[in-house]
Image (cartoon, grey):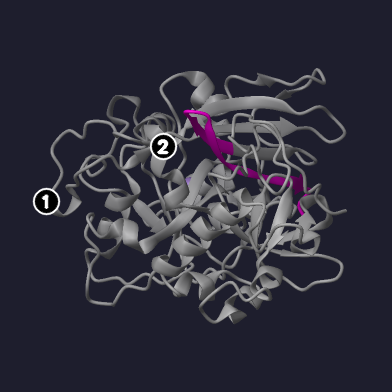
Amino acid sequence: MMGNIINLGSNINGSSDMIIDIPPHSDFSIHNIPFGIFSTADTKPRVGVAIGDHILDLVAVAELGVFEFDTKVFEKPALNRFIGLGKTVSSKVRTDIQSWLKDDQSPLAKKHNLFVSQSDAKMHLPVQIGDYTDFFSSIEHATNVGMMFRDPANALLPNWRHLPVGYHGRASSIVVSGTPVIRPKGQVMPNGASSPVFQASKRLDFELETGFIIGKNSIMGSSISTEEAEDYIFGKVLFNDWSARDIQKWEYVPLGPFLGKSFASSISPWVVTLEALEPFRVAGPIQEPEVMPYLNYSGTKNYDINLEVSLTPDKGKEQLLCQSNFKYMYWNMCQQLAHHTVNGCNVNIGDVMGSGTISGKDEQSYGSMLELSWSGTKPISILDGTTRTFIEDGDTVTMRGHAEKDGKRVGFGEVSAKILPAL
Ligand code: MN
């Protein structure tokens, strides 16, 4: 099915006089132009751009001879090589596409074969991920978890306000939206028991996060300042850091998360560039006490991105579980990257950095079942008459995110995954 190459009236995304039909309130407006990897029945995985309900095939666009660089990068099954050309190139590709889509005399006009319906495409992991790091940067989430796992009176550990706490996650088990996730098994210590038991996790949880994707290699032994950090960030995705709370609680002392996290993480297929998010910058929370000089920053480094999580039971109806916002983050991405590299650790193109669970102040904004059900003590009512404290087999968890301001909407689409029974 090809796109309707028609002109539309004005709508929220300002998509009047566009060469392709963009539905009002689409996440993939002319202001967005996110990059991803797709394939169809006829084509191997390749680079594309989401626009409305369609994908602009950049291999096909390159065949028009409109780009002045080696367009073989678009034939790769990951964005790494394209990202590696640098922001000068990737930014120009984005702004060129924006102007072409608005110009009925452009090289793209009347070329129906350049567009693929998203419903006819299969999405793949957008980047080849070498390393994955996850942070713990929402003060509300860290406080809630500290209260439940440790001491309600001293929920935040002494280091928390001085550095963005993180751990090295597992890149091998990051999967793209739509890939089912199998319930993990492992050691847990039941309440009141004197020795651990081996079982399928009974406390399977999601974590509402975003991830940023490294867009430039750094050199081992050097560090990235908060000032330079944005130059090293290509863009963002939605990120579900699946967590088995019972496995996590028993194993995490003293070295942090391990098997309770490494079984799977799900990411959204479209990488929204930092350039697309530029209009949505906002100031972050005041940091007290004052941070060390290497973590100091100037300017507005947080982003106003609405986030939500919904649950769909097997054969049931989808329902909203929580709504949060990326702007709540205590530690911003530039501080995370500066901290990550301050010891000389290098980062590489395609590395994924998880924000950490993004919770807000009120209970409807908590970004995990652990917090929403307060460690299982407050069951959540489900439309089919059942309740949930954690995620059950057959449940599908879907996260969505978008920014919107002055009639411009820039969204991420979704990251969704169904939980299958333990093997
Ligand atoms: Mn996490």
Q: Going by the picture, which residue comes out furthest to the front?
A: 105
| Horizontal and vertical percent position of residue 185 | 67, 54
Give the residue type that dot 2 points to.
Answer: Phe
Which residue occupies the foreground of this view, 19 or 311? 19
Viewport quadrant of the C terminus? bottom right
From the Cβ of disc 2, is ligand 1 less than 8 Å away? Answer: no
The answer to whether residue 415 of the structure is visible from this angle is: yes
Which numbered tag is attached to residue 293?
Answer: 1
- Which element carries disc 1, helix, strand or loop? helix
Secondary structure found at label 2? helix
Residue 421 lies within the magenta run: yes
In space, the residues marked 1 and 2 are separated at their CA atoms by 26 Å
Q: Residue at x 58, y 26 (%)?
A: 322
Q: Is residue 155 above or below residue 6?
A: above
Q: Which residues are magenta?
A: 401-423
Q: Is residue 2 above or below residue 131?
A: above
Tell me the chief SS of the magenta region.
strand
120 in relation to 290, above or below: below
Which residue type carries mark 1? Pro
Which residue is disc 2 drawn over? 280
